[in-house]
Amino acid sequence: MNKTFRAHDSFHPRFKEISNEIEKISKELLSYGHKYDSSCFTRSLNENETVESVLCGHSDRLAIAWNFVVNPNRSHIQATKNLRVCRDCHESTKLIAMIRQCEIIVRDANRIHHFHKNGQCSCNDCF
Ligand SMILES: [Zn+2]
Ligand SMILES: [Zn+2]
């Protein structure tokens, strides 16, 4: 029962750099008052997991972190996700766009989210 899909891609050759970047982003989010939201979880945590570590493994976050690894001064990022973006990713991506002053576009299963540098998303949080 516990063989749920995991977005964590530890086989990526630059995984270490990506996870460092995710950690950095995560600290920035927390310092801006972000609170990790576990309400979108569909399963219980394994022993070695925290709410934060699971949420940070979502594919849209990995994609965003990867973009910052490749170019820390990016002003534009585009990512696709084949599921619907979860509430926590949506909140954090809004903050990341503002903190990093980077336009982020995430196309999910339902719609396209355009996260602006002012911390707003084009969907007005209706998703
Ligand atoms: Zn998510
Ligand atoms: Zn949105």
Image (spheres, helix red, strand yellow):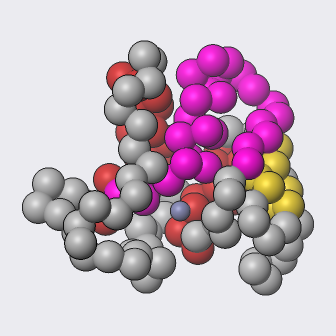
Q: Quarter of the image holding residue 9?
A: top left
Using the image, determine if residue 107 lies above or below residue 9: below
**Residue at 38% in and 27% down:** 11
Q: Is residue 43 visible?
A: yes
Q: Position of residue 116 (x, y in %)?
A: 83, 53
The quadrant of the rendering that contains the N terminus is bottom left
Q: Position of residue 4 (x, y in %)?
A: 34, 63
Rendering coords of residue 13 (x, y %): 43, 16
Closest to the observer: 40 or 21? Answer: 40
* Position of residue 100 measured from the top left corner of the image (x, y, whole percent): 67, 39
Is residue 57 in view? no
Is residue 55 located in the magenta-colored stretch of the structure?
yes
Instruction: State the residue in front, 57 or 35.
Output: 57
Q: Quadrant of residue 2?
A: bottom left
Instruction: Answer with left or right where residue 53 lies relative to residue 22.
Output: left
Q: Which residues are magenta?
A: 54-80
Residue shown at 75% from the left, 61% from the top: 108
Look at 82% across and 35% down and name the residue there. 76
Quadrant (top left, top right, bottom left, bottom right) of the C terminus: bottom right
* Residue beneath the point at 71% across and 22% down: 73
Q: Is residue 126 magenta?
A: no
Horizontal relation, residue 90 to residue 48: left or right? right
Q: How many numbered circles does the render carry?
A: 0
Q: Is residue 109 above or below residue 105?
A: below
* Residue ranking furthest to the left: 47
